[in-house]
Image (cartoon, helix red, strand yellow):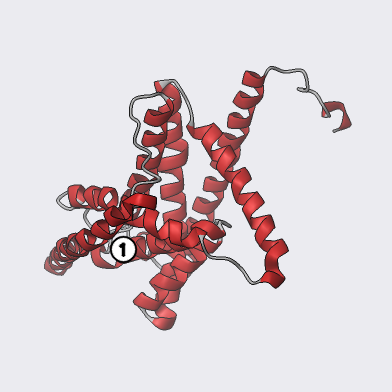
Amino acid sequence: MSNFKGLFKESSIFSKLLMLIGFACFFTLIAISIWMVISVLCAYLYSDNSVVFLNLNNKFHFGGVIILISTFILAIPFINLVGEFNQQLHLPEALKRIEDWMKASELQAKNLTEKILNVSSFEALLLNIFLISLLPAIGEEFFFRGVVQNILKNWKGTIVAIWITAFIFSTIHFQFYGFIPRLLLGAFLGYLLMWSGNLWIPILGHFVNNFIAVVFYYLNYNGYQTINIDTIGTGNSKWIGVVSFFLLIPTILYLRKTFLGYSAENSLIKNDK
């Protein structure tokens, strides 16, 4: 291994950044593959029917897709507002060294993410959509909502399982200053599974959430738009975050009614068979 030390020391900045992106993509694929293998293996070992265990047996309805996408777009200012509140939280003075470490770690993670997301070509955008939007949505939802939430609901019921899973989901990302927004995201994805009875619905929601970030980073970096979606609902625009919250309530209730209706329809179809 010592032969490789400093191997790319004299490489250009462009080459180093390209290599960094390549490493990130490679290890992302490995991580997602591990999530998937664990999920499928657990489903196989824990049940007589892996498809049913993972909630993949229900018919997918496209009627609620537009509402689902609209919900995630509408939620952006509110989530930003919650994120701003989260960033103002501090650990006790005795844990200051831990807090400083978390801040430094999250700053490094943010810088790495921006390097990966800030691309100029359309081909690189498509690659980011695949690696950052699609693969994590499938891998993480199979593991957290498909397996973890499924196991926990048999212990304490579905609602408790949703929130425990969301807590684990947020914790495992190791981002203290984004913990609450990710907790809410995880809970919402859990409720989507409960309402629809179809794992592909939270997978779609997770994908949409990531897709919005990837596309807006691309547009902003390449000068196609000047609005920073990460700041809408924060600072002087807090009122937009509040309005977003109150608009989300009827939207989510309507989304719930829609998916519950589809879930009931799926049950009728199965009973008829």
Q: Is residue 158 above or below residue 226?
A: below
Q: Is residue 104 above or below residue 47?
A: above
Q: Can residue 92 be seen in this snapshot?
A: yes
- The extreme bottom residue here reads 156
Q: Where residue 115 appears, x then y in whole percent?
A: 55, 32
Q: Residue at x 45, y 64 (%)?
A: 147
Q: Is residue 245 above or below residue 68?
A: below
Q: Residue at x 46, y 72 (%)?
A: 164
- Front residue of 273/247: it is 247
Name the secondary structure under disc 1.
helix
Residue 9 placement: quadrant? top right
268 left or right, relative to 78: left
Residue 43 placement: quadrant? bottom left
Q: Where residue 259 appears, x then y in whole percent?
A: 19, 61
The residue labelled by disc 1 is 193
Tell me the quarter of the image containing the N terminus: top right
Q: Residue at x 35, y 41 (%)?
A: 212
- Front residue of 213/244: it is 244
Q: Where residue 264 appears, x then y in whole percent?
A: 15, 67
Q: Can residue 50 be seen in this snapshot?
A: no
Question: How many neighbours does mark 1 have within 10 angstroms: few (below 14), some (14-19), or many (20 or more)?
Answer: many
Q: Residue at x 21, y 49 (%)?
A: 65
- Front residue of 268/198: it is 198
Q: Where residue 184 appears, x then y in whole percent?
A: 39, 63
- The extreme right residue here reads 2
232 left or right, relative to 180: left
Amino acid of disc 1: Leu
Tell me the quarter of the image containing the C terminus: bottom left
How many numbered markers are drawn?
1
Q: Is residue 185 above or below residue 237?
A: below
